Amino acid sequence: MEEKNQTGQHTRTSNTNCTRPIRCIVKMGGASITCKSELEKINEENLEKVSSQLKQAIMKSSTKLPGMDWSKRPGKPDISLNPDDFGDHSVTDSSRFIVVHGAGSFGHFQASNSGVHKGGLNKPLVKAGFVATRISVTSLNLEIVRALATEGIPSIGMSPFSCGWSTSERNLASADLSKVAKAIDAGFTPVLHGDAVFDEIKGCTILSGDVIISYLAAYLKPEYVVFLTDVLGVYDRPPTEPHAVLLQEIAVSEDGSWSVVKPKLQNTSNQVEITVAAHDTTGGMATKIAEAAAIAKLGIDVYIVKAATSHSLRALNGELRNNIPDDWLGTVIRFLR
Amino acid sequence: MEEKNQTGQHTRTSNTNCTRPIRCIVKMGGASITCKSELEKINEENLEKVSSQLKQAIMKSSTKLPGMDWSKRPGKPDISLNPDDFGDHSVTDSSRFIVVHGAGSFGHFQASNSGVHKGGLNKPLVKAGFVATRISVTSLNLEIVRALATEGIPSIGMSPFSCGWSTSERNLASADLSKVAKAIDAGFTPVLHGDAVFDEIKGCTILSGDVIISYLAAYLKPEYVVFLTDVLGVYDRPPTEPHAVLLQEIAVSEDGSWSVVKPKLQNTSNQVEITVAAHDTTGGMATKIAEAAAIAKLGIDVYIVKAATSHSLRALNGELRNNIPDDWLGTVIRFLR
């Protein structure tokens, strides 16, 4: 099956229908769950809080659930498993979520030192970098799957490379959503990630978590999308600058243009935000705004919010869908009907 | 595409052609690379030796190669990466290998305590066990990929679940070999493993490494298959019993029957070996003989050999293909033309 995706590229895909709609796609930003300044270091405290909030949103439970990671952990007590903890009745009221995470301090070192994103798999350094990048990002994926499973979320790691996702000139060329849909229908929470993949023209490249999110949103049409980041949301200038203003609501119109609805800015024009986006040298926030606007244009609310806060919990729970409370801090990006 | 596999089941598969033939499929038996008596413990010494032997067989090099695992390891010195180590010229003379590993002391605890192999994903305990089993086996897969990459082998983890492999009443129902073939064509060594997968009838089950090997062998037609185990080969009785005799050569005939060619046994009949096979309560050796005979019937030599020995090195290198030296210890299973 060949279709045109939202950016007009032809993409091979397969039957993507879930039996019931997806509630939410969550992006765990690399900066929110890893320590960006230290190579391959997870921000354990944040990851634990994010996992606990996801448990509340997905499993609809604020009490402790029996864990699903029964593996040994260095420095942790031995596994104690009591099968009776799980009960006999099927759990049917969990919410259908997909988690996609970035790489943060995993993968970047390996990718940038080898040039995997630029392609050229016949070069020994690029091939080695492809292997090293996948080892690093799949290590992080495993840790995130374990953190979610520890909270009682039936999480399943699904590496885009293994699932057959590939690109052509860095644009998504092939993505088999049927496996993701099947896992969701079976009651699991798939956990995808930015990955090194094959590229039809360049040989290989890096497929970012943000591109994966856009694609999943376009085809699986979740009720809402949440980007978990390490700042409160999108600002009118770098958030470390004095007088930086948090943009709380952005409206996207039919023609793709967008404007700040809240707060009322003195000097409001689209130019402002485009300049704003440029402050993020990693491309993280710039990509996020562009991708978020494209998702919002599909009629899907997008929340950009600081991970592991009361604000992220409300976003994940879907509490913001009809009404944004005055005390909620974050950025909502919506289609203006 | 629907085809009948060697055991007569209908299996959906996809384009499986590699551009060049596969040289060898290696099964790393769980018992040979993990400590079976201790939960989730890798036999580091054996894994290192096996990886080094595979490097010699795949990369055709007995000298140290630059490593491809650039991730941090607890207790290990920091990564030192020198891009110049990799040189500019393409490596074209590496051999095309596929590695499949068992679970050993990974996965069994999680699977047997939840009954994943029996199916019933709507039961909370089975669903949790599915998650826990995948965490355990993918942890082992990551460690094996890292061990191979450390030796300089461009290893790529490919989880059967993520690759879309599934069963029907525990028989393989769907297996996408095109991804494996594509990875091999790009110069990588795919590393697959026994995994928890979806079953069309039972909901879920365990797909064993041995079933994966049989399937790969039938469709990818390697020159030879090596089973790495923790004993020298197949014996006429439990190898711990006095006077146990190593069966060095077994011939499989057109009708599927098989007989011991070497050594000449006093009391030789097929009944003997079938009884012999029953000594292995884990089903490991029994399954191995049956699967090995089925592979041999396709005209593919099968070597069952003790891991991390001079005998396994000779088997992996393909030195036994025309002539079995008298001082080689192991079991070869061959089609009798």
Image (cartoon, coloured by chain):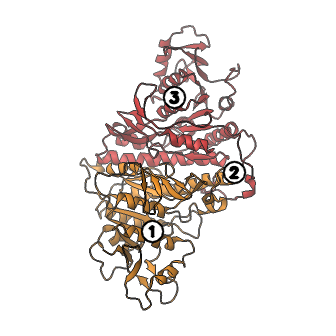
Chain colours: A red, B orange
Q: Earlier in the sequence, mark 1 or mark 2?
A: 2
Residue assigned mark 2: B124
Q: Chain under label 3?
A: A
Q: Amino acid at mark 1?
A: Glu
Q: Are marks 3 and 1 on the same chain?
A: no
Q: Residue A223 appears at what percent x and percent y?
A: 62, 28
Image quadrant containing the C terminus of chain B: bottom left
Compare residues B262 and B71 and report the one nearer the observer.
B262
Q: Is residue A103 visible?
A: no
Residue at 69% of width from left, 51% of height from top? B124
Q: Amino acid at mark 3?
A: Ala
Residue assigned mark 3: A218
Quick check: marks 3 and 1 in contact, CB under 8 Å? no
State the SS at label 2.
helix
| Structural crowding at the residue carrying mark 3, measured as other residues with C-alpha within 10 Å and reported as few (<14), some (14–19) or many (≥20) | some
Q: Chain under label 2?
A: B
Compare residues B222 and A284 and report the one nearer the observer.
B222
Q: Which numbered dot is residue A161?
A: none
State the SS at label 1.
helix
Classify residue B126 by image quadrant.
bottom right
Query: Left of A316 or right of it: where is A27?
Result: left
Q: Which numbered dot is residue B291?
A: 1
Q: Chain under label 1?
A: B
Residue at 71% of width from left, 21% of height from top? A327
| Structural crowding at the residue carrying mark 2, measured as other residues with C-alpha within 10 Å and reported as few (<14), some (14–19) or many (≥20) | many
State the SS at label 3.
helix
Mark in the foreground, 1 or 2: 1
Q: Residue A103 appears at what percent x and percent y?
A: 49, 39
Compare residues B283 and B77 and report the one nearer the observer.
B283
Compare residues A60 and A9 and report the one nearer the observer.
A9
Query: Left of B169 or right of it: where is B157?
Result: left
Q: CA distance from mark 3 to mark 1?
A: 45 Å
